[in-house]
Each structure stands twice: as structure tokens, then as C-alpha cells.
Image (spheres, rainbow, N blue to C red):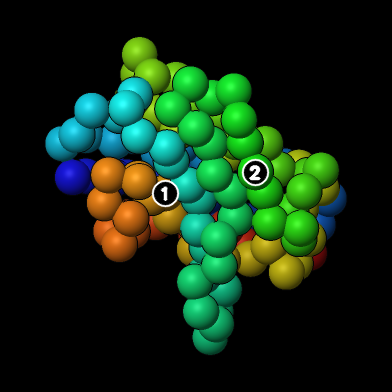
Amino acid sequence: VQLQASGGGLVQPGGSLRLSCVASGFTFSSYAMMWRRQAPGKGIQWVSTIDTSGSTTSYADSVKGRFTVSRDNAKNTLYLQMNSLKPEDTAVYYCVSAFSPGRLGQGTLVTVSS
């Protein structure tokens, strides 16, 4: 199982970023996918989940209304559109598959700062 997230960077408060995660090593379209994050000095936090078809999504209260998760099963890719970013969104973001929920893969750093 390989999960490679990208798209992070430095953004000002109120800005937007779109994260991507390319998956391989399993049948992507058959498993729910999740985003998790780890802020500096803190534990892993669940951010969002999307079902196999993309029709059902859920979000942590801290990001609800600002973040949107989606997936393209033809491209084996998971996305996270992040709008109205806040400094407390600063973290390394990881994608996770229900196929191997303990495997974080390679994360991408998002820094929200002025």
C-alpha cells in the first residue's frame, strides 16, 4: 500500500489549498478513504471520511463547512479542498485507506500563517 499526499504549502489565514493523495497497492475504488492530520506537538486528528462512491462524506466539527473531500476512482486519487484556512489548521496532512487504516503514508505539510 502506497499513499502519497501532496499540495501542501504556506498560505495566509483565509486562503485556500487543495491537497491530493495518489494511492496504489490496493483496489482504491473498493475502500473508504480518510484524511487525518497532526499539528506540531499534538496527536493525530481525524479530519474527514468519504465512502467508496464519494456520495457520503463526514467531517470533524473543526473543519465542517470549510473543507470538502472528494475522490476520483479512475485516477486512484483522493482530494481535500481547504478554504478559509486558519492558523490552527497548520499540520501535516495524511490520507488513509480503510484497506489499511493504521498506515498513514507520506504526508504533506500545511502551514497557515501571516
Coordinates of residue 61 in the picture (x, y in percent): 76, 58
Left/right placement of residue 15 relative to residue 26 reads: right
Q: Tag 2: residue type?
A: Ser
Q: Are marks 1 and 2 in contact (CB under 8 Å)?
A: no
Label 2, on which residue? 58
Instruction: Give the secondary structure at mark 1.
Output: strand
Please give the name of the residue rendered at 60% of the width and 55% of the height, measured from the top-left corner: 47
Q: Tell me the quarter of the picture where residue 52 sits.
A: top left
Left/right placement of residue 12 relative to residue 5 reads: right
Left/right placement of residue 3 relative to residue 50 reads: left
Please give the name of the residue rendered at 70% of the width and 43% of the height, measured from the top-left corner: 67
Can I make out residue 37 in this image? Answer: yes
Left/right placement of residue 66 relative to residue 52 reads: right
Label 1, on which residue? 95
Please give the name of the residue rendered at 34% of the width and 24% of the height, measured from the top-left corner: 29
Coordinates of residue 64 in the picture (x, y in percent): 77, 48
Q: Tag 1: residue type?
A: Cys
The label on residue 1 is none
From what the image shows, is residue 74 above or below residue 16? Answer: above
Coordinates of residue 113 in the picture (x, y in percent): 73, 65
Q: Which quadrant holds the N terminus?
A: top left
Please give the name of the residue rendered at 26% of the width and 51% of the height, measured from the top-left corner: 100
Few, some or many residues within 10 Å of mark 1 (<14, 14–19, 20+): many
Instruction: Give the secondary structure at mark 2.
Output: strand
Q: Residue furthest bottom?
A: 41
Coordinates of residue 96 in the picture (x, y in percent): 38, 50
From what the image shows, is residue 93 above or below residue 65? Answer: below
Q: CA distance from mark 1 to mark 2?
A: 14 Å
Q: Which quadrant holds the C terminus?
A: bottom right
Dot 1 or dot 2, earlier in sequence: 2
Q: Tell me the quarter of the picture where residue 90 sits.
A: bottom right
From what the image shows, is residue 101 above or below residue 18? Answer: below
